[in-house]
Image (cartoon, rainbow, N blue to C red):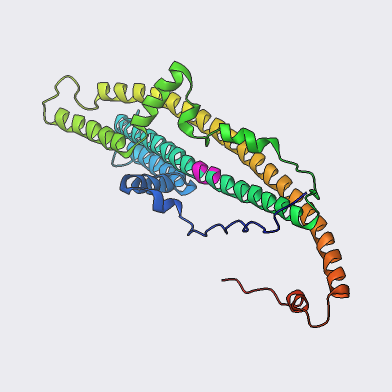
Amino acid sequence: MSTDTTPSPAPPPVRARRPQLPSEQLGLNDRIAATMTRAVGSMWAVYASLLFFLTWITLASVGPLHGADPYPFPFLLFLGNVVQLLLVFVILVGQGILGRLADRRAVKTYTDAEAILGQVVKLQSHMVEQDMILNRGIALVEADVHPWIAERKLQPPVRVRDQFIGFNGRLAAWITERVSSMWAFYAAAVFQFGWMGLALAGIIRFDPYPFAFLLFLSSVTQLIFMFVIMVGQDVLGRAGETRAEQTFLDAEAILQQCRTLQRHLTEQDRVIVTICSYVRQNAPPGHQIHAELGRPPRARP
């Protein structure tokens, strides 16, 4: 049996890339939303809110605010309702940002795993070709390909939007896409403060201070959006679990292929050592092969 003794070139190295921070992937509105989320998503915001409300209640009960906002503190309740509605939009925007960043990371992780598996497969093919040279065409190690390598080609990267399934899922995706942006937050702020301004100017006469109908609309909107937030949390959780499973299978396949490569290299080393020992003992003195066997490794280009 004749075999080609010219080995194929080794797989090219994977090009390094500069890590990209999440903040570099955000637009202006997303950065504003991230800043607001960090500001209100801390215990200091909780302490400040408690201090503000307790101070206001005290001053409105026995202090100078008693005449302006006595019990049951209608203005404080109104102010809290306005802030709650705006914070609901901040939460929705934060969920939207997390979902978009998670989708981008999922695509990058999927692409990286695909590149690693591709390099491993090329290395295995290269070593099989070397077996043809070293061992008369007989493979030194039986191929052990992880089944996930073939299965993952049928599965695209896991994205948040793919978790919205069916009519209800499409409706939830449509609502989430439109309310999880800073433009929705701006619209809510303009609507509420615009309503108050028009009511105080006497243009909206059916809802004077303390704006009972506006508070009613805000309460209904908050209740609806709380369910939207819960749906978004469930979707983010499902997407995260699916990504974790996919990443686990990728890592498992890579580790198995690396073990196979290690066994293959060990067997090739055994054959190479035997061949080199034979050459040293039988090659004529001064033959070029002696210099080749003693040459140090080449420097990386």
- The residue closer to the viewer here, 63 or 239, is 239
The answer to whether residue 84 is above or below residue 20 is above
Please, which residue is most extreme toward the front here?
A: 2
- The residue closer to the viewer here, 234 or 196, is 234
Q: Is residue 3 magenta?
A: no
Residue 203 placement (x, y as % from top left): 11, 26
Residue 145 placement (x, y as % from top left): 71, 40
Using residue 126 as the reference point, say whether residue 100 is left or right of it: left
Q: Is residue 12 visible?
A: yes
- Residue drawn at the location 39% of the way across and 39% of the way down: 53
Q: How many marks?
A: 0
Q: Quadrant of the C terminus?
A: bottom right
The answer to whether residue 217 is above or below residue 250 is above
Please, which residue is most extreme toward the top here?
A: 167
Q: Quadrant of residue 197?
A: top left
- Residue drawn at the location 41% of the way across and 52% of the way down: 23
- Residue drawn at the location 11% of the way across and 27% of the way down: 202
Q: Quadrant of residue 276?
A: bottom right
Which region shows up in magenta?
A: 106-110
The answer to whether residue 175 is above or below residue 291 is above
Residue 170 placement (x, y as % from top left): 42, 21
Using residue 99 as the reference point, say whether residue 141 is left or right of it: right
The answer to whether residue 234 is above or below residue 134 is above
Q: Is residue 68 visible?
A: no
Using residue 254 as the reference point, say whether residue 65 is left or right of it: left
Q: Main secondary structure of the magenta part?
A: helix
Residue 17 placement (x, y as % from top left): 49, 58
- The residue closer to the viewer here, 283 or 155, is 283
Using residue 89 as the reference point, say whether residue 162 is left or right of it: right
